[in-house]
Image: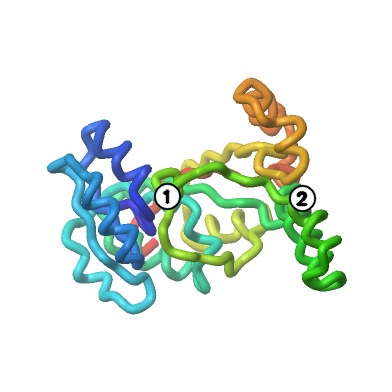
Amino acid sequence: LDVACGVGKNSLAFAHCGYHVLAIDNGKESIDYLNRENKFTNLETELFDLYKSDFDTLTRRYNVIVVAAILEHLEDPSGILARLIDRADEPCLILGDLPNGYGAAEWVHWLRKKIRRSWGESGSYQKLSDSLRYKHNYDETDSVTLTDTPHVHDFSWLMLRDLMKENRMESIRIRNVDFLIGTPVIQKLLLSTRVAQRVDVAFAQWLPRWMANGWFFSGVCRSGS
């Protein structure tokens, strides 16, 4: 089950590997885009709202739940994850990632907002803001989702650890994502090449959890546990 699949990059990759995938999202534009791109018979899609839809209507059960870049957008991430686990076969593998709400990239974004509140929309602000912004030269096919989804939570390492405890995850594995990738100015000046980005990712593995820009995690859960 690929939760909040967006335009389906993960869904398509899993389907290509031969897995049977159910991709759900509350954005009609994203689901329509994925349906146009989908050439696999083992990939199904469903327009599904994690707050309004009936979980019992999900078209198939599953033994892997993918929660990539979604938990930070939910009002009740632990509760939603528990409901998904209740619909899964046992044991169920959870695969996910989370941005560190207090990592380097988030601090620079916070600084941009602080400057904007102080300076307003003046020309000086625009120049400084543009210099701090990491610009992606992407088109819609490079986007994760076609729906605007702001963060609701700024996750810390302790919050992620509590979420895993609340859902009684076992056999937990965690890896730091990176250290400075995506950080405005630094990305532009120091991390614009693939080699530099690989060095940043490798360096991040030596850092304490709280210093990373985010985390990949996995764990095993059982329904009703």
Residue type at numbered disc 2: Leu
The colour scheme used to paint the residues is: rainbow
Question: Disc 1 versus disc 2: distance between alpha carbons?
Answer: 23 Å
132 versus 77 height, above or below: above
Camera-side residue of 78 and 59: 59
Residue at 45% across / 46% down in the picture?
139
**Residue 166, horizontal then vertical, whole percent:** 52, 63
Residue at 39% across / 49% down in the picture?
66
**Residue 195, horizontal then vertical, whole percent:** 64, 21
Query: Which quadrant of the view contains residue 57?
Result: bottom left
Camera-side residue of 48 and 7: 7
Question: Is residue 62 found left or right of 210 in the rendered image?
Answer: left
Residue 219 visible at all = no
**Residue 176, horizontal then vertical, whole percent:** 63, 38
Camera-side residue of 91 and 202: 202
Q: Which mark is residue 132?
A: 2
Residue at 22% across / 49% down in the picture?
36
Q: Residues within 10 Å of mark 2 (few under 14, many from 20)?
A: some
Q: Which mark is residue 140?
A: 1
Residue 110 visible at all = yes
Residue at 30% across / 65% down in the picture?
28
As drawn, the residue found furthest toward the bottom would be: 52
Question: Is residue 128 found left or right of 138 in the rendered image?
Answer: right
Camera-side residue of 175 and 165: 175
Tell me the SS state at disc 1. Answer: helix
As drawn, the residue found furthest toward the front would be: 123
Q: Residues within 10 Å of mark 1 (few under 14, many from 20)?
A: few
The answer to whether mark 1 and mark 2 are in CB contact below 8 A is no
Question: Is residue 72 found left or right of 92 in the rendered image?
Answer: right
**Residue 29, horizontal then vertical, whole percent:** 32, 62
Residue type at numbered disc 1: Glu
Badge 1 or badge 2: first in the primary sequence: 2
